Image: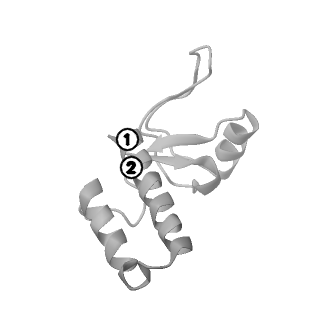
Amino acid sequence: MKRVPLAEATPGMILAKPVASLAGQLIVPSGRSLDVSLIASLLDLGLTSVHVENCPGEEGEPVKSVTELEQALDHRFRRVADDPDLARMRETIRRHLRALHRTTA
């Protein structure tokens, strides 16, 4: 399961969790396949993201821990470690990875 911003959702993705209004009323049940009109309707309602089953292209890919993702990030920035602007960028990405991990855990 993955939380996907509606702006990045694509037709064919399957809802892993039901979509409910702020009042708790069911809007779309889990298991429903997204299509263009449903994505547009959810955006019109002001929703920003949905939880979907494995996204296309993710099947068979191992799930990496935050530690593994941070190590890969450090490896990618190893040649520019002394650049203060790029160091800030790396730390921003690190915070984003940690935040994403908390929402999907």
Q: Position of residue 102 (x, y in %)?
A: 37, 41
The structure residue drawn at horizontal position 47% and vertical position 53%, both measured from the top left corner, is: 96
Q: Are marks 1 and 2 in contact (CB under 8 Å)?
A: yes
Q: Is residue 29 above or below residue 93?
A: above
Measure how far apart labels 1 and 2 are at the Cα level.
Answer: 6 Å
Residue 50 in view (yes/no):
yes
**Residue position marked by numbered label 2 in the rendering:** 98
Q: Position of residue 22 (x, y in %)?
A: 62, 19
Front position in the image: 28 or 63 = 63
Q: Position of residue 19 (x, y in %)?
A: 54, 30
Q: Locate the C terminus by quadrant.
A: top left
User: What amino acid is found at the position of numbered circle 2 in the picture?
Assistant: Arg
Q: Is residue 81 above or below residue 105?
A: below
**Residue position marked by numbered label 1 in the rendering:** 102
Residue 64 in view (yes/no):
no
Q: Position of residue 3 (x, y in %)?
A: 46, 45
